[in-house]
Image (cartoon, grey):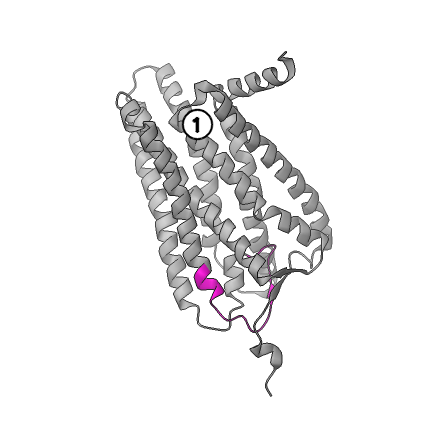
Amino acid sequence: MEKPNQTSPLVEFILLGLSAHPKLEKTLFAFILLTYLVTLLGNGVLILVTVLDSRLHTPMYFFLGNLSFLDICYTTSSIPLVLDVFLTPKKTIPFSACAIQMFLSFSMAGTECVLLGMMAFDRYVAICNPLRYPVVMRKAVYVPMAASSWLAGGANSLVQISLAVQLPFCGDNVINHFTCEILAVLKLACADISINVVSMGVANVIFLGVPVLFISVSYVFIIATILRIPSAEGRKKAFSTCSAHLTVVIIFYGTLFFMYGKPKSKDSQGADKEDLSDKLIPLFYGVVTPMLNPIIYSLRNKDVKAGVRNLVSQKYFSG
């Protein structure tokens, strides 16, 4: 017997969230709201400092300002929806809104992958070729570098989401996630998704594999150069200029590889725990990592700390 709901196209999805864990929802709502506010404040202050403090008008801090703005955009593209899902059991979202949210999140993630590679190149030139740094990393170079990372992330997202929205979604409309996560959405398609899988595989190589390889090679040369510095103070000073970036890279890519590389459980009890972890790990990636970035750069960078102090003193003591 033919079922009408199997042939009519979907106009909306239902976000399941953590409806099976109501107590955990309440705890996570407070935690995520607080984390989101800290993310907005921390990255907002970092952007202001890099713009207003003339001492920070350098390529490294220009990239850092881009990273902070990126983190604000990334969290804002998904976290308000996550909070709404916690407040509204089985939250519905229109198909078009789901597509927009997927595009923004996917675009920001791809941009950050490329941007972290650009920042590694900046540190490589600064430490391994300091005399050529002002020439190589002049404004006519580093501004297009940052712009290209945004364009690359946006172009990749446009391709992936365009392929996804062309699929027929004519059956189950329940997304077992907090947001319109693209892998969860693709599972609902009632057509062959092999093109989508291949396309995302190629994108993962370009936006994950290539930047990781580039960053790794850059830091091999950076560490080798630092170890050749004769004085301990000189080595410490050189390493301090790239330690914050290296910490952010490890957290960012470590979470990504753990998220997609962990083995799948076969027993039912393990599958239930896995289903919960498959939701919470991306949540950590999308909420906690953007909050940590300004904290890491503030704690490990004297110039940023000095800029924050100047910004606070100007705000409260000027005039």
Residue 56 vs residue 121: left or right? Answer: right
For residue 63, which quarter of the picture? top left
Range of magenta residues = 162-180
Residue 290 percent across, percent down from the top left: 54, 38
Q: Amino acid at mark 1?
A: Tyr
What secondary structure do most residues of the magenta stretch adopt? loop
Residue 81 vs residue 262: left or right? Answer: right
Viewer-proximal residue among 85 and 213 = 85
Q: Residue at x 37, y 33 (%)?
A: 143
Residue 27 percent across, percent down from the top left: 71, 46
Residue 317 percent across, percent down from the top left: 64, 13
Q: Is residue 114 visible?
A: no
Give above or below for 291 relative to 234.
Answer: below
Give above or below for 300 relative to 179.
Answer: above
Q: Which residue is mark 1?
A: 61
Q: Residue at x 30, y 19 (%)?
A: 229
Q: Is residue 266 visible?
A: yes
Quarter of the image with the N terminus is bottom right
Give SS at disc 1.
helix
Viewer-proximal residue among 13 and 186 = 13
Residue 270 percent across, percent down from the top left: 58, 60
Quarter of the image with the C terminus is top right
Residue 158 vs residue 77: left or right? Answer: left
Callout 1: few (<14), some (14-19), or many (20+) C-alpha neighbours within 10 Å?
many
Q: Is residue 231 magenta?
A: no
